[in-house]
Image (tube, rainbow, N blue to C red):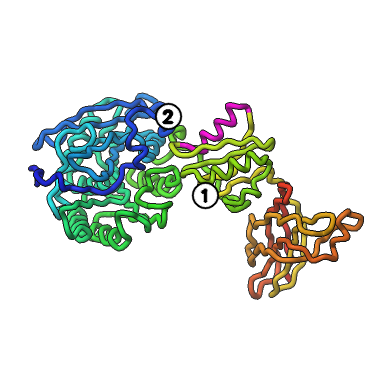
Amino acid sequence: MTLGLTRLVALLLLLGIARPAQAQIEGFNPALAPPAPMNEKVLRLAGDPDRPVTLEVTLYTPPGPGPFPLAVLNHGATNAGKGNRGTRYRYTFNAYYFLSRGYAVALPMARGFAGSGGDLVHDGCSLDIVGRENAQDLRAVIEAPGRQPSIDPRRVVVAGQSFGGWTTMALGTMDVPGLRGLIGFSPALRTSDCQWQDQAMISGARRFGADAKYPSLWFYGDNDSVMPVETWHGVFAAYASGGRRAELVTVGRFMEDSHQLLSSSEGLPIWTPRADAFLARIGLPSTATHPEYLPMPSPPPSHFAAIGDVAAVPWLSDKGREAYREFLTRRFPRAFVLSVAGSFAVADGGFDALGRAMALCGNAGINCAPYAIDGQVVWTGGKETPKDYARTVPAGRTSTLNFACAVNPDCTSRGLPKLWVSEAPQQGTAAVLVQDGHPGFPPGNLFAKCNVASVPGVAVAYTPAPGFAGSDVVTFEETSVDGRRHSFRIALTVQ
């Protein structure tokens, strides 16, 4: 049954497949794809036999003969209609994720999109009917790859983003051989011919939930440009009221728009652990057997310096610092790596900015380490084995464990060292404080005369828990104004 096709010109579906710059590229672009064999095939497959149409489907397979479990990934849609069919869904991190877990990946284009025939179906505020109509095409598409000997038709998972997530949840109301579970990334459907869109989504989700046959995993964020928090809470609650097992993962705020969780590598650490756990629960592979399909893992923030503190970056020349300033203007994902000789490399955008920056150094025979990734400093270069000290401090009071400063021969300040607590105490708290204090140079040192002066510095202060007496340990790191790195571990006796 075809619904309301005469009104397609007025149709406006919101939700992106990925960032627009990626979605417009049809030819292979190595900056957007893993440096691993995709074994790509573009298939022409039949959709719903009751409404004949030919659909364009991209199929990726990992190395090996299989048979592979199958992941079917459904795209989103931005400003879709007769005048904008979009381009083939191809560069997406959820495809790379499933390839890394050993899945064959099918990416079908819905009718009315890219090289698929037909026109997009809609029916005013009956958003559940729109989802089910598209899901009929999807069910027909799933059966075709399953007939290939390299694919195991008994192990299927379906996932989708936005409009594709809505279609995914609609599919869950149907009997689909081999289907184990559903994953939705910001499931949503908005159409310009429905005045009450939020209420229509909630009503549609309730109907999906009442007929749901498979467990599902849902991702939503707090700064979603398409789905306000109160709307997606209502949509999920309505679906879950049907009683079928459904899990909601709230990702909080993600970059500029949590609706784009799949569009960049920054989202991977947020959603992949929950997807792994879900796949394991439904009896499907959930561990990385082909890690080459995913970007190089980013180190955690080191708290060495603020991302915008150009002067804190060690080893760089004036030219290098100018390059770092320029790096700060680049888009995410981005990476700045450097060597002890002052060499550096920068990469941004695409599939693996960090991996490309490190490769630039490696190809030149230079040993670089990451300094900054996206909006965080991750540099830990030169971290040494902690020097061990012992201190006795009073119970119930705050004590200064260390005061670090840098002075000129005339005892004026040369700047502030960087201090941070790397291992917090278990029986109290440790804080880094910027304050004036007296240096502690040993007798005979050139700067010992400055010990009587009060100079700017940075201190580590320890406060034991109320009523605590006994042993505790705190470890902190220091980077001097000259870029030298030191680590200190202090065994405390509180009495």
Q: Main secondary structure of the magenta part?
A: helix
> Total of numbered circles in the picture?
2
On the rendered image, what quadrant is the N terminus found in? top left
What segment is highlighted magenta in the picture?
352-365
Q: For mark 2, give the secondary structure.
A: loop
Q: Residue at x 29, y 58 (%)?
A: 232
Give how far across and how far down residue 76 sits, in percent. Answer: 28, 44
Q: Are marks 1 and 2 in contact (CB under 8 Å)?
A: no
Circle 1 sits on which residue? 375
Q: Is residue 66 magenta?
A: no
Circle 2 sits on which residue? 30
Q: For mark 1, give the secondary structure.
A: loop
> Hey, what amino acid is under mark 1?
Gly
Side of 212 relative to 155 (left or right) = left
Q: Residue at x 15, y 55 (%)?
A: 125
Q: Which mark is residue 297?
A: none
**Picture quarter containing residue 140?**
top left
Compute the Cα span from label 1 to label 2.
24 Å
Asked whether residue 244 is in view, the answer is yes
Q: Residue at x 41, y 35 (%)?
A: 100
Q: Residue at x 41, y 56 (%)?
A: 253
Give how far across and how far down residue 350 sits, in percent. Answer: 43, 37
Asked whether residue 285 is in view, the answer is no
On the rendered image, what quadrant is the C terminus found in? bottom right
Give how far across and how far down residue 22 sits, in percent. Answer: 36, 37
Side of 52 relative to 150 (left or right) = left
Mark 1 and mark 2 lie on one chain; the one further toward the N terminus is 2
